Image (tube, grey):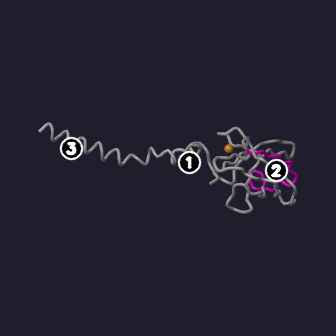
Amino acid sequence: MIRKIGVILLGLVFLGSMAWTPVFDPVQAEVRKPTADADYARTKLSKGGIFKASYTSEPDAVPVNRLISWKLKVETPDGRAVKDAEITLSGDMPEHGHGLPTQPRVTKNNNDGTYVVEGIKFSMTGWWTMTFTIKANGKTDSVTFNLQLK
Ligand SMILES: [Cu+2]
């Protein structure tokens, strides 16, 4: 009787461990790590709530190891175009302590609240942050976008 219960318990433990295996998959865990408090929205309010910023990438699916350009759109929180912003940016891999291999910058103000950013190159897959510091109308604020590149 006791032996039978033991066998049943062992069977349950075995089935249980099989069911739980995916949770401990190290590859999955690594991919999910930065997502705990990161969001990957392409439109965000700046930290101090002064600007609303959004970006589009060319190409849209952000590639690795290719020189690409982004278009950054800057608005007030209620949606009015901010046409005279001074913008600087920096890219980082927070887990690795390094940035982009290039020094991208805004090369064109389209005078409609959008700005062309050229010279962006992500050198490896993983979690990146792109921080834009925006200065306009006598105010400065920054916004950070998260990216998970594959
Ligand atoms: Cu890295």
Closer-to-camera residue (116/12): 12
Closer-to-camera residue (42/65): 65
Instruction: Determine crowd level at label 1: few under 14, some 14-19, many 20+ residues with C-alpha closer than 10 A.
Output: few
Number of numbered discs on residues: 3
Image coordinates of residue 82 in percent, x first then y, are: 83, 53
Which numbered dot is residue 99? none
Pick the quarter of the image with the N terminus. top left
Q: Name the secondary structure under disc 2.
A: loop
Tell which quarter ligand 1 is in.
top right
Image coordinates of residue 140 in percent, x first then y, are: 82, 41
Stretch of the chain drawn in magenta: 73-91
Pick the quarter of the image with the C terminus. bottom right
User: Ligand 1 near label 2 (Cβ, under 8 Å)?
Assistant: no
Closer-to-camera residue (104/65): 65
Specify the amino acid type for callout 1.
Val
The residue tagged 3 is 8
The reply to whether dot 3 and dot 2 touch (C-beta < 8 Å) is no
The reply to whether dot 1 and dot 3 touch (C-beta < 8 Å) is no
Which numbered dot is residue 31? 1
Q: Earlier in the sequence, mark 3 or mark 2?
A: 3
